[in-house]
Image (tube, helix red, strand yellow):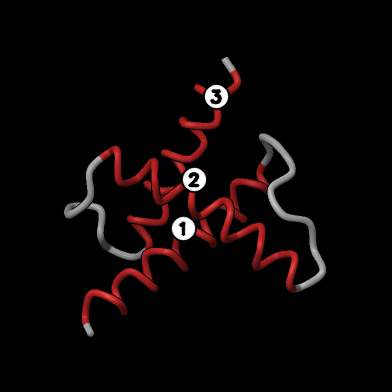
Amino acid sequence: MGILLWIIFGALAGWIASIIMKTNSGQGTVSDIIMGIIGSVVGGFIMNLFGQSGVTGFNLYSFIVAVIGAVVVIYIGRMARNK
């Protein structure tokens, strides 16, 4: 049951990030899930650089960290694709 909740958490974070970055129409559900999960890891790493905790569980703070990380992942993907 836990893995299913993390997939849903990642999907929501990836979906919100794709809306923020205006890539929602070009991405599918699987891509949103992948961006959200990778974004959680990247967001946690970024927050650790600033001396804050990363993803701490199923709460609003962790969701915001995951969305920030997913936005960064989408931005880096755009920059790599445009080169």
Tag 2: residue type?
Ile
Quadrant assignment for the N terminus: top right
The residue at the point 76 percent across, 73 percent down is: 50
Q: Residue furthest left?
A: 26
- In whole angstroms, how far apart are the C-alphas of marks 2 and 1? 8 Å
The residue at the point 37 percent across, 46 percent down is: 15
Corner quadrant of residue 76: bottom left
| 3 or 1: tag closer to the N-terminus | 3
Residue 37 - label: 2
**Callout 1: 10 Å neighbours few (<14), some, many (20+)?**
many
| 2 or 1: tag closer to the N-terminus | 2
Quadrant assignment for the C terminus: bottom left
Q: Vertically, is 31 above or below 4?
A: below
Q: Which residue is mark 1?
A: 70
What count of labels does the image hold? Answer: 3
Q: Which residue is mark 3?
A: 3
Tag 3: residue type?
Ile
The residue at the point 54 percent across, 61 percent down is: 68
| Residue 42 in the image, given as x and y percentages of width and height | 57, 60
